[in-house]
Amino acid sequence: MNFDLKINIPIANNEVPELRAAVGWERREQDYPKLFERCNFWIGVRNDEAELIAFGYVCGMGLEHGYMEDIMVHPSYQGKGLATKMIKEMLGESNKYGLEIVSITYEKEKESLYKKCGFNPGTGGVWKNNDT
């Protein structure tokens, strides 16, 4: 299957929340369009019917470090190598932006995917405000 990955593809505000829901995540509708204004770049993939089937982004302060987040592929298109292609494309784009370090937080079962894409597992921590 051939996928057309596009950096900064035009995306309507409702499309990413719908994709998030399809993969079983919280919709987070309040994040859009704010996210597009704040991240370095995003990547999207559409199917033949022009539906958004994959998405991810890199954000940061425009310095040497960026953070990759929300790598998602619609369940109907998973297992076809699309996530790997997206991640590698985003790392190439990160290089164009001058980012020397890109980090990502992922669940343990995704470790082999990210290692295949060149990430080195490390230690770290995540803080979440549970008051909201």
Image (tube, rainbow, N blue to C red):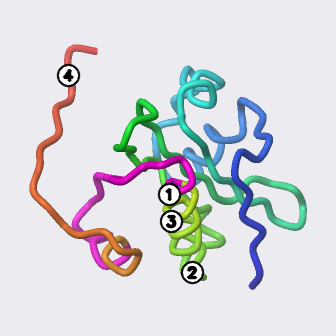
Question: What label sits on residue 87 in the rendered view?
Answer: 3
- Most distant residue in the top direction: 131
Pointer 1 and pointer 2: residues touching (CB < 8 Å)?
Answer: no
Q: Neighbour class for label 4 at 10 Å: few (<14), some, many (≥20)?
A: few
* The N terminus: image quadrant: bottom right
Q: Label 2 sits on what residue type?
A: Gly
Give the residue at mark 2. 81
State which mark lies toward you, 2 or 4.
2
Q: Position of residue 13 (x, y in %)?
A: 72, 29
Which numbered disc flags the more N-terminal residue, 1 or 4? 1
Question: Start and end of the magenta stretch?
Answer: 94-113
Q: Position of residue 10 (x, y in %)?
A: 80, 41
What residue do we see at 49% from left, 45% from top? 58
State which mark lies toward you, 1 or 4.
1
State which mark lies toward you, 2 or 3.
3
Q: Position of residue 14 (x, y in %)?
A: 71, 33
Give the residue at mark 4. 130
